[in-house]
Image (cartoon, helix red, strand yellow):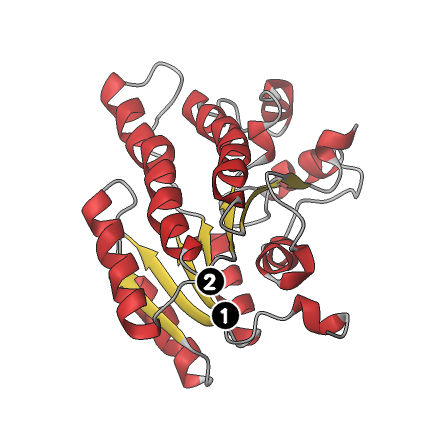
Amino acid sequence: MKTLDMFSVEGKVVVILGGKGVYGNAMVEGFAEGSAKVYIGARTIDTLENNAAALREKGYYVTAFKADQADEDSLFAFRDFVLEREGRIDAAVLNAVARPVSGFHCPKSEYEESMAVNGTGTFLAMRTFGDAIAENREGSIVMIGSMQGMIGPDYPMYEEAQMPGGMAADYFFHKGGMINLARFGGSYYGRFGVRCNCVSPGGCRSEHNTARFAEVYGKRTQLGRMATAEDLVGTVIFLVSDASKYITGANIPVDGGYTAK
């Protein structure tokens, strides 16, 4: 195989849970442009289907499905839908996330809702799609974590950027757990030839943060800026491609050097 061919995802059946939002949209488009067969799932189907339809009009292979990561039966239905159409699943990208927690002193119900999707749900998604991928005796699971699973919150930064209270404890809890769950998944599924890794992006420039926050945050990175959604896509495609066939149980920061200091 030629070196550049190792990075190809052409023809691979790729499931993306959490296939919308800043990172979700970029990953879906990236895999579609790479000629993968892309199946995207999220709890709300309208926006998802609109995005899928727009990509199909460009000639790409993208299918939307309503799937709730907190509901195991919903995950089974999504898995079976893909298997009935394709006969296999080559990779799963776990990007779904819920952000119901309003702050450190939130109601207990908000924290429990977060854990149902981000904690238990991530495990269920890994197991549901990991077992299906294992039938091929090769493939890849990629979890989209966060650098905030590696470090604590920088409250002085939020105060300087005039965005106080910008972090919630549940996010640090489940993103930290995701890194070690990827290590567990790498160990469990390794005997089936399936790799499991985590990607931990840093802050992404979007409408959710101000120009002042981007400026303050950028000064704390080695590259001097916040990420764009496209900065994540290449790493995820690499972890799905054959170019990463000997990488498993790893966590890769994509944070502009924020955590390398």
**Mark 2 secondary-structure assignment:** loop
Q: Residue at x 53, y 36 (%)?
A: 187
Residue 240, x across and y down, in percent = 57, 58
Farthest left residue?
A: 73
Q: Residue at x 69, y 68 (%)?
A: 6
In this orientation, which residue lies closer to the viewer: 60 or 228?
60
Mark closest to the chain's N terminus, 2 or 1: 1
In the image, 30: left or right of 223? left
Say which quarter of the image contains residue 241: bottom right
Q: At label 2, which amino acid type do we have?
A: Asp
Question: Considering only vertical position in the picture, is 173 above or below 70?
Answer: above
Q: At label 1, which amino acid type do we have?
A: Lys
Residue 96, x across and y down, in percent = 39, 46
> Considering the image in quadrants, where does the N terminus appear?
bottom right
For mark 1, what is the residue? 12
Categorize mark 1 by other alpha carbons within 10 Å: few (<14), some (14-19), many (20+). Answer: many
Say which quarter of the image contains residue 242: bottom right
Farthest top residue?
A: 105
Q: Residue at x 57, y 29 (%)?
A: 148
In the image, 218: left or right of 198? right
**Mark 1 secondary-structure assignment:** loop
Question: Considering only vertical position in the picture, is 159 above or below 183?
Answer: above
Residue 227, x across and y down, in percent = 65, 48
In this orientation, which residue lies closer to the viewer: 82 or 230?
82
In the image, 69: left or right of 235? left
Categorize mark 2 by other alpha carbons within 10 Å: few (<14), some (14-19), many (20+). Answer: many
- How many numbered marks, from 0 up? 2
Q: Which mark is residue 63?
A: none
Residue 136, x across and y down, in percent = 44, 61
For mark 2, what is the residue? 90
